[in-house]
Each structure stands twice: as C-alpha cells, then as structure tokens.
Image: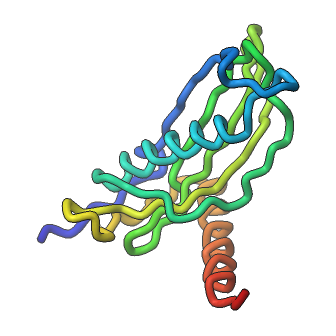
Amino acid sequence: MEPLRAKPVSASRTEHVQIVMPGHINGEKRLFGGILMEWIDVTAAVAARRHANCNVTTAAVDNLQFKAPALRNSTVVLCAQVTHTGRTSMEVRVDTFVEALSGEKEMINRAYLVMVALDENGAPAPVPQLILESDEERQEWEGGCRRRELRAQRRQQKY
C-alpha cells in the first residue's frame, strides 16, 4: 500500500450556504438548532472527505456553541476545515455565520467534530497527516491536541 501524502489545511476547506426557509424555523421564528446541527455535520463530513479521500462517519461533536440566532430568510454560511488529525480520525472546525445582504458576516456558531475515515468495508482507515502553514493553523492543531486529551479522559470516566 502506498503511503498517504500529507495535505494542507486548505485542501479540506469547505463552504456551505443556506437560506433559512419557513420549514427550518421554530415557533420563535428562529432556525431550529437541530437543523443547524445537520448542516454542520454535513459540512464537516465534506471537509473530512476532502482530506481523507474516502467516506467518513461522525464520532463526536464538541463545543457546539450557539452564540446568536439565525432568523427566517437569513443567509447562513458554514465554513469548515480540518484542524487536527490522528491515525484514522480528523477534527473539523465548522464556523457558522449569518450573512447580511451587505455581505457583512456575524458568527453565530462554532463547532468541533471528530470524523473517522472509513475503508470500503466500513472499518476505520488511515488519514493523511496535516500540513500546518500558518500560526492560526498551528494554534488550532494545539487546541485539537487538548480537545483530544479531554475526549480521552471523558471516555475513561464511569457514569
């Protein structure tokens, strides 16, 4: 088997745009959190697939923070990129913005998801290493290391 080639963060960058329609809103005329979570999951999966060149599955969602609402008829922009890699897993950051008609964006959500690469049999598959090209990418990598440690600690806790 040929060794995997490392890839830069930029190879995974993904943007998804939605307009909040009447079927997406709750009784308060705000975007349902569950709908946004679906869009986040799909956008993260696309970024992870671009990095790993294979199918992926969601293993964890961390730090899903709703900072502000998206209202009916809002343009919602989701931006994702791989921030950390393990042997078979990738951490993906998804930032969600509401974009005004002027083009100005307000961040309404940030989420970190762990995606696992899958081979043709559905088993975990190795992923390429991540090439870090900026200070921001290195900071995200370090944050990913800390979040990975916290997830490992939580898995070991007994309920």
Residue at image point 64% right, 35% down: 35
Q: Is residue 98 depicted above or below 100 in this figure?
A: below
Q: Residue at x 47, y 66 (%)?
A: 85
Image check: 12 left or right of 108?
left
Q: Residue furthest left?
A: 1
Taking the view exactly as shown, the residue that stands out farthest to the front is 27
Say above or below: 26 vs 120.
Answer: above
x, y percent for residue 41: 54, 46
Residue 116 in percent (x, y) is at 42, 64
In the picture provided, is 45 more to the left or to the right than 118? right
Tag count: 0
Q: Give the residue displayed 20% in from the left and 69% down from the top.
A: 3
Q: Which residue is more in the foreground, 26 or 60?
A: 26
In the visual, does 143 lie left or right of 49?
Answer: right
Residue 21: which quarter of the image?
top right
Q: Quadrant of the C terminus?
A: bottom right
| Residue closer to the observer: 79 or 114 | 114
| Coloring scheme used | rainbow
On screen, residue 106 above or below 128: above
Q: Quadrant of the rendered structure where residue 143 is?
A: bottom right
Q: Between residues 143 and 122, which one lies in front from this camera angle? A: 122
Quadrant where the N terminus is found in the figure: bottom left
Residue 63 sits in quarter: bottom right
Up/down of 146 relative to 107, above or below:
below
The answer to whether residue 15 is left or right of residue 29 is left
Q: Residue furthest top?
A: 101
